[in-house]
Amino acid sequence: MKFLMVDVGSSGSRGDGNVFHRSRFAKKLKKHQLDLPPPCKLYGSSENVPFFFVGDAAFERSSHILTPFKGKFLSPEKRLFNYRLSRSRRQIENAFGALYKRYWIFQKHLQTSLAHAKSIVLSACALHNFHLMDEESSTPCRTRRYRCNKHGKYHDDLKADGTIVYGRFKGEDPAKEEEILHRLEEDVTISNPEDTTLVGTKVTEFFVDFFIDNEIPWQWKSAGIPTCEVSHL
């Protein structure tokens, strides 16, 4: 739920897609300057899938940006795709929800200059990240119940009374971590990645089929797809 790159100051009347297109982030993404990990195989697939960002329908779909299908009368496959994609986008909405709840200044119009408004937003994002790194920090009620040592800091921490809060790495299995590392190295070390790497709209087409072949038990019901339509897929 951290904000890793923030661009503030564009006019919202331009539309989300146009604002993003003019941002430094979008320009670096198109020029392949974001140091994204190389494409790798997903479990149960022989194709190399590029790492991507998720967005809403306002953004332009590409190899590195996955967006939902537009329209009301979509096929079951596309409705399922939109549902599975929305599960990822939910984390983005949670980040903005936490920012909104924590800093009440965003619950009304900012009565200040554009320059001050930029500073307020950037400061709030920086403080938001700081709070997430500090497990003693107060958090919004909706996320407070998830704060515990197990899901807190990665490293060990020493409290003021001398007690040790063990980090998340204590619960990791070294053998399992090494196995995962070797598997990832094998996946990305291929002789000619251009032959099997998905590009453009083929990434979306791949996930339309992938979500059907690798289903989660509740996905059809949650996506509002009747059993009779599922049987025809």
Image (cartoon, grey):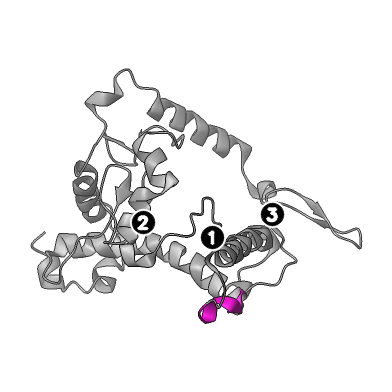
Which contiguous range is marked in magenta? 103-109
Q: Which residue is mark 1?
A: 1
State the image coordinates of residue 33 (x, y, percent, origin top left): 43, 34
Q: Residue at x 62, y 37 (%)?
A: 174
Q: Which residue is mark 3?
A: 153
State if disc 1 and disc 3 touch (CB < 8 Å). Answer: no
Neighbor class of circle 2 (other Cα within 10 Å; few <14, some 14-19, many 20+) is some
Q: Nearer the viewer, residue 204 or 100?
A: 100
Confirm whether the magenta stretch covers residue 10.
Answer: no
Among the two numbered marks 2 and 3 on one chain, the one whose residue lies closer to the N terminus: 2
| Circle on res. 19 | 2
Residue projecting furthest to the right: 161
Q: Residue at x 32, y 48 (%)?
A: 65
Q: Mark 3 and mark 1: span between their CA atoms?
A: 14 Å
Q: Is residue 34 left or right of residue 149?
A: left
Neighbor class of circle 1 (other Cα within 10 Å; few <14, some 14-19, many 20+) is some
Number of marks drawn: 3
Tell me the mark number nearer the camera, choosing from 2 and 3: 2
Q: Secondary structure at mark 1?
A: loop
Q: Secondary structure at mark 3?
A: loop
Q: Is residue 3 left or right of residue 80?
A: right
Tell me the mark number nearer the camera, choosing from 3 and 1: 1
Q: Is residue 88 among what the camera can see?
A: yes
Residue projecting furthest to the front: 113
Tell me the mark number nearer the camera, choosing from 2 and 1: 2
Q: Secondary structure at mark 2?
A: helix
State the image coordinates of residue 69 (x, y, percent, origin top left): 20, 60
Confirm whether the magenta stretch covers residue 108.
Answer: yes
Q: Nearer the viewer, residue 119 or 88?
A: 119
Q: Mark 2 and mark 3: span between their CA atoms?
A: 34 Å
Quadrant where the C terminus lies? bottom left
Among the two numbered marks 2 and 1 on one chain, the one whose residue lies closer to the N terminus: 1
